[in-house]
Image (cartoon, grey):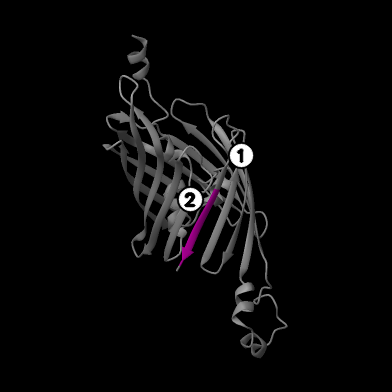
């Protein structure tokens, strides 16, 4: 009798993959992403951040070190229009080669589980205030049996000044999946920019039926090559004679990141070359069964 009674409570493992985080940059910063994102990945962390992305962006992510035949992937694309910014994103989690058995414990072969979340995000900006909305569609396929659901995320950001910014995000403020309620998650954060290239971030998060917790992250970007805009000794003639390789290196930047999230430490780096950015993160999971994460992500800007 206790089993069906317990089942009536909220199951926070429902669609847990959709709350694992995407994008190596924000994961490296302890998943404190409600305020710091301003690219196409904002559709996941806070859709209000899409208002600051370039005209057209493409993003992707892959976890390259998951064991037990698991995978976790992400892809997105977005564009700015006169009426605001739109982005389409896809989060996918798979588990393959699951051993199947019948009621008599006889092997029935292997099967797989595929979980997908599709989101269409919109954002607009009015002065220093940005707002965003993400309707979502959930699709799960387990051994050929499909289930669906839907959810809505909302977010907002406000630029206090050139040094401080605040943001808030409600994930699955409304969400259902196969007749069950999806647990909501509330995030509120602060981002500080005390020095050129340095970002400090902190988020407070609350998931339904769970205790609140905090996330902290830091990031520092610096140029690898010389900055042609800062080198006043170069003449117009000498600049025109630079090779394309020298010109490319002069715009190359690298970033270093650290993060903390509920006992989990993360560290990462990134490289940015004009419209191309690649990021890496190592996340220490501190788990008896699951290993640590090695995640790569890519963003293209046009």
**Location of residue 18 with respect to 77 vertically, above or below:** above
User: 262 or 199, which lies in front?
Assistant: 262
Q: Which mark is residue 253?
A: none
Report helix, strand or loop for mark 1: loop
222 on left or right of 22: right
As drawn, which residue projects farthest toward the right?
Answer: 233
Residue placed at 59% from the left, 80% from the top? 244
Q: Is residue 36 visible?
A: no
Determine which residue is flagged by label 2: 62
Report helix, strand or loop for mark 2: strand
Quadrant of the rendered image containing residue 195: bottom right
Question: In x, y percent, where is residue 14?
Answer: 38, 31
Question: In x, y percent, where is residue 86?
Answer: 36, 57
Q: Residues within 10 Å of mark 2 (few under 14, many from 20)?
A: many
76 on left or right of 145: right
Q: Is residue 168 magenta?
A: no
Q: Is residue 218 visible?
A: yes
Q: Which mark is residue 284?
A: 1
Q: Which residues are magenta?
A: 295-301
User: 55 or 98, which lies in front?
Assistant: 98
258 on left or right of 4: right
Residue placed at 36% from the left, 60% from the top? 84
As drawn, which residue projects farthest toward the top?
Answer: 1
Q: Which of the two discs, 1 and 2, labels the residue nearer the N terminus?
A: 2
Residue placed at 50% from the left, 50% from the top? 23
Question: In x, y percent, where is residue 142?
Answer: 32, 36
Question: In x, y percent, where is residue 43?
Answer: 42, 51
Instruction: Specify the principal SS of the magenta part.
Output: strand
């Amino acid at each position: 009798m206790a089993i069906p009674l317990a089942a009536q409570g909220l199951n926070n493992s429902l669609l847990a993959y959709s709350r694992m985080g995407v994008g190596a940059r924000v994961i490296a910063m302890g998943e404190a992403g409600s305020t710091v994102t301003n690219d196409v990945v904002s559709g996941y962390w806070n859709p209000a951040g899409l208002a600051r992305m370039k005209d057209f962006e493409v993003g992707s992510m892959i976890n390259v070190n998951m064991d037990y035949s698991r995978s976790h992937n992400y892809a997105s694309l977005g564009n700015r229009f006169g009426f605001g910014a739109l982005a389409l994103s896809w989060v996918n989690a798979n588990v393959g080669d699951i051993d199947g058995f019948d009621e008599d414990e006889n092997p029935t072969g292997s099967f797989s589980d595929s979980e997908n979340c599709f989101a269409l995000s919109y954002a607009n900006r009015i002065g220093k205030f940005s707002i965003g909305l993400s309707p979502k569609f959930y699709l799960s396929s387990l051994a050929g049996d499909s289930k669906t659901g839907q959810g809505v995320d909302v977010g907002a950001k406000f630029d206090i000044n050139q040094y401080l910014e605040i943001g808030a995000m409600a994930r699955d403020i409304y969400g259902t999946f196969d007749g069950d309620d999806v647990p909501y998650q509330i995030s509120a954060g602060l981002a500080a920019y005390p020095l050129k290239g340095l970002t400090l971030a902190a988020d407070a998060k609350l998931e339904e039926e769970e205790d609140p917790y905090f996330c902290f992250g830091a990031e520092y970007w610096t140029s690898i090559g010389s900055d042609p805009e800062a080198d006043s000794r170069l003449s117009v003639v000498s600049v025109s004679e630079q090779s394309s390789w020298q010109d490319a290196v002069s715009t190359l930047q690298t970033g270093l990141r650290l993060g903390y999230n509920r006992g989990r430490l993360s560290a990462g780096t990134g490289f940015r070359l004009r419209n191309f950015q690649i990021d890496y993160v190592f996340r220490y999971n501190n788990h008896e069964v699951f290993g640590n994460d090695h995640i790569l992500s890519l963003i293209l800007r046009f």
